[in-house]
Structures are given as structure tokens and as C-alpha cells.
Image: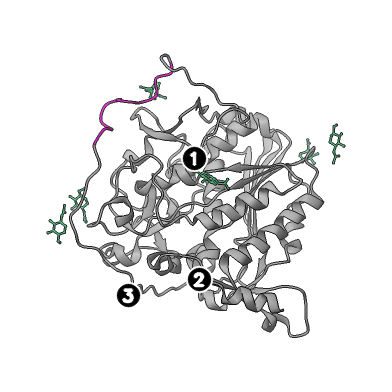
Amino acid sequence: MGTLKALKGKSSLSVITITICTLAFVTLFYTQTISSFSFRLKSCPRRNTAKKSFPDDRNGDLGALNYAADDRFEFDPEECSLVHGKWVFNRSIKPLYSDRTCRYLDRQVSCVKNGRPDSDYRHWEWQPDDCILPRFDPEIALRKLQGKRLMFVGDSLQRGQWQSFVCLIDSVIPQGQKSMKRGRLHTVFKAKEYNATIEFYWAPFLVESNSDLHIIADPKKRILKVDSVAKHAKHWIGVDILVFDTYVWWMGRLRTNSLWGSFANGDEGYHELDTTVSYNIGLKTWANWVDSNLNPNRTRVFFTTMSPLHERSADWGNANGTRCFNETKPIPKKRYWGSGSNKQMMSVVARVVKRMKFPVTLINITQLSEYRIDAHTSIYTELGGKLLTDEQKADPLHYADCVHWCLPGVPDTWNQILYAHLL
Ligand SMILES: *[C@@H]1O[C@H](CO)[C@@H](O)[C@H](O)[C@H]1NC(C)=O
Ligand SMILES: *[C@@H]1O[C@H](CO)[C@@H](O)[C@H](O)[C@H]1NC(C)=O
Ligand SMILES: *[C@@H]1O[C@H](CO)[C@@H](O)[C@H](O)[C@H]1NC(C)=O
Ligand SMILES: *[C@@H]1O[C@H](CO)[C@@H](O)[C@H](O)[C@H]1NC(C)=O
Ligand SMILES: *[C@@H]1O[C@H](CO)[C@@H](O)[C@H](O)[C@H]1NC(C)=O
Ligand SMILES: *[C@@H]1O[C@H](CO)[C@@H](O)[C@H](O)[C@H]1NC(C)=O
């Protein structure tokens, strides 16, 4: 236990205050389970200096995708990195669904229904530097999934990606040919004609915790069983394509209460570890399970990297801004990286995945999502199951959600990348 004492003393993650402030949102990530929530972020600073605006180059089709004069090649996962590229505005891009046509969207992400007035955020396309990312074709996606189970596993951001996927294919499935069976941990959408399922399994840390089913609002009271994954993982067996994520729930504090082994003192026997340390152990537990239980000839495994938070408008030079509120354009600056994506946590993922026997494909969405300050649900969302009141909407400093994404929106691009890997 001596080494643990040493670990305890080590300096902790550099997580900015405002991120911590806003991580009260973490408690909302599974909104169904929360009925009331009081939200106070008194300590979050507000900046009041000059507002910078971004060059407005999105009117017209300047710089938009032009396939004819394009020497980039079709996407090939071996050849092309999707990490670097740019968002290109093209008004004639229509999302494959809306929050009115797709009835599987949660209120939490239905920004238009919730009153979001601007629409530009729905017309940007991710254009990698080196190749052309194919557009999502729902018919082809369904054919690829014929007779298969696709399961998204993780937190509410992963649930957003799952809903996006369901809605992307929903429009081509006739009424009566689909079903949705909702459970507290496990939800299954089925496309009957194709005998395909698109499933979501709730495991915000991937490993077990005392806050999985009944969310514990106070991060100090959460205990992570960093060496236990079997209770969740037994639901992952037999799935053909697994997509995992876990990040933001770890970020509520600089330290996490971590428990391993099973001792008579039960939940009392935890240690406080630096978050990167427990994240590392937790991910290794997941990795060991994948390595020893899944056969790469039968199963494909993806891991979606961290989804950035946009809490500090000063990060992107809008010192007068209020978090992500009222942003309507992506950040144009190449390789922009803000304080809402923790590089140390990212390198833990890279290291753990690299050492695995099982070939896990990373869906590296962090950089492309970093640019999209305009695409969060912001004030067009709900709190504790209720739409924000006008009073709450007028107070974006405390009530804007700069963690989750509007749908349709950025998670559609994450799925476009997943789709490209399935072709
Ligand atoms: C920024 O805020 C200051 C103080 O409230 C105000 O005087 C100024 O006009 C604002 N700048 C912009 C560009 O909105
Ligand atoms: C914009 O998107 C439309 C519809 O997908 C496409 O036909 C068009 O080529 C795009 N515009 C440019 C300039 O690439
Ligand atoms: C449907 O798919 C499941 C696997 O997802 C398979 O076990 C079952 O045999 C399939 N049924 C038919 C009728 O093809
Ligand atoms: C996967 O398939 C390859 C080639 O068919 C075979 O050599 C290998 O043993 C298989 N791996 C497992 C774990 O079944
Ligand atoms: C949102 O931004 C626009 C300009 O970008 C500004 O005119 C408007 O007043 C802002 N709204 C609020 C509520 O700050
Ligand atoms: C994802 O891409 C970024 C570059 O944008 C890189 O820094 C990071 O290491 C990558 N993440 C992983 C887990 O490989």
C-alpha cells in the first residue's frame, strides 16, 4: 500500500476551475434518473473584455467541397487520418433527419424543438485534409449491419452518438419494420427487415461504480471499482460491433475514490487516486476484458475519444462570451485545442489501446469536435426532465450545457467516421 500513499501525494491533473464548475452537469448525464436538481455555480468566473469575432467566410460556397476539382482520394482507414481537416459550410447539405422527423431523440438534445433559432450549425461538413470522407448512406449502413448487433457503450455523449445513428438510418425503415425496447441500462433499437440491432448500454465509467444505476450527484461520494467490469461486460458478449467511450465522468474531481479487490469492509476500503491514475487502471481493466473475452475474427471494437467541453470562451478568444452560449460558428483556427480536452487523459487512452492484443479502432473525434463551439445544446435543453424556463435561459452562465451536442449535429459526423470504417 506504500506505493498508493505515494500516488496520493502526487500533484494532480491540471483541470481548469470552470470545467470543474460545470461538471455539475455530469450528474445530469442520465436525465431520466434525476427528478430535481439545484444548480449553482457561484464560483465560475465571468470575463468582461472585448469580444472578438471570427472571420465570416461561410457565406456562399467559398472553400466548400468540390469533388470535381479534388485530388484527395476516397477514405481508406489504412491511408487516411481523419483527425486533421476543416469544417466546410455548405447550405445545401441537409441532415438526414430532424428532431421532428426522428422520434427517438431525447428532449435533451432536440435543440430546434427546444427553441434554438439559428440553423447554420447543421450545415457544416467535416473535410479531412487527405481524403474524402464518404457521406452516410443509410441503406448501405443497414446492409452492412444485416444480421448484426451494433452496440454503443458508455456515457450520455455515447448515448447521443447512438441516437444519432438510430436517426440516421430511421428514415429508410418503414413504420412497422422497427422497434425500440428501452431499459434502464440497456436499450435496443431493431431494424426488423435487416435483423439488425443498434443498442445502447449505459456504463459511464465502463468499469463498475456505485453511481451507475442511481446517479450520485456529488462526485465526492462516487466510488469506482476500477478493477471490476464483468457486471457490465457480460452484456457485451455476442455483439458484433462495439463502440465504447468514457471520459467526462472521470473529470468531476482531481481525485477519484477508487476501490479494488473485495474486502470485508466493502465500499469503505477505497483509496483516493489521481484521476489519470484511476482512469489508467479502469481502462486497463476494460482492455484486459476485451483482450481475453473477444475474438477479433468475430467482433469489431471501436473507441470514441473524448468529446471536448467548451466552458471557457476566453480559450477561443471571445473574452466577452458566456461559455458556449450564443456561439454560431466553428472556430476557424487550425489545430485549436481548448482547456476542455485533457491531453493527459487522451494519452492514457492512446497508451492503453496501443498495448492491447485486440485491434481496437480509435474514432478520434476530439480535434474535429474542438472546433465546434457552436454545436452544443447550450440553453436549448432540459434540466431534470424539464425544459429550461425563460429565467434559466436568461442565465447561460449557470444553465447553458456546453458538454452535450444538438442533434442533428456533430455526433452525426462521428457516425460518418464509424460508417466509413464499416464499409
Ligand atoms: C464587451 O463587454 C464590455 C463590457 O461589458 C462592453 O463595453 C463591450 O462593448 C463588449 N464588447 C463587445 C465586442 O461586445
Ligand atoms: C454542397 O452539398 C451539395 C449536396 O450534398 C453538393 O451537391 C455540392 O456539391 C456541395 N457544394 C460544393 C461546393 O461542394
Ligand atoms: C438475427 O440476428 C441474430 C444475431 O444478431 C442471429 O442470432 C439470428 O439468428 C438472426 N435471425 C435471423 C432470422 O436471421
Ligand atoms: C482468426 O482467423 C485467423 C485466420 O483465419 C486464424 O489464423 C486465427 O487463429 C483466428 N483467431 C482466433 C482468435 O480465432
Ligand atoms: C448573441 O450574439 C449576437 C451577435 O453575435 C448579439 O447581437 C446578441 O445580442 C447576443 N445575444 C445575447 C443574448 O447575448
Ligand atoms: C487524437 O488526435 C489528436 C490530434 O488531434 C492526438 O493528439 C491524440 O493523441 C489522438 N488520440 C489518441 C487516443 O490517439
Q: Compute the Cα span from label 3 to label 1.
A: 34 Å
Q: Nearer the viewer, residue 41 or 117?
A: 41
Ligand 3 - quadrant of the structure image:
top right
Up-down: is 172 above or below 41? above
Q: Nearer the viewer, residue 129 or 112?
A: 129
Q: Are marks 3 and 1 in contact (CB under 8 Å)?
A: no
Up-down: is 301 above or below 222? above
Disc number at residue 331? none
Q: Position of residue 391 (x, y in %)?
A: 27, 67
The segment highlighted magenta reads 56-67
Q: Is residue 79 left or right of residue 260?
A: left
Q: Compute the Cα span from label 2 to label 1.
A: 30 Å
Our reading of the magenta stretch's main secondary structure is loop
Q: Quadrant location of the N terminus?
A: bottom right
Please name which of the two marks, 2 or 1, marks the residue nearer to the observer.
Answer: 2
Q: In which quadrant of the rendered view does residue 249 lie?
A: bottom right
Q: In which quadrant of the rendered view does residue 172 lie?
A: top right
* Badge 2 or badge 1: first in the primary sequence: 2
Q: According to the image, label 3 marks what residue?
A: 42
Kind of element beneath mark 2: loop
Q: According to the image, label 1 marks what residue?
A: 412
**In the orientation shown, which residue stands out farthest toward the top?**
68
Please name which of the two marks, 3 or 1, marks the residue nearer to the observer.
Answer: 3
Q: According to the image, label 2 marks what residue?
A: 253
Q: Is residue 144 left or right of residue 313?
A: right
Q: Nearer the viewer, residue 328 or 151?
A: 328
Residue 275 is covered by the magenta coloring: no
Q: Position of residue 86 (x, y in %)?
A: 40, 34
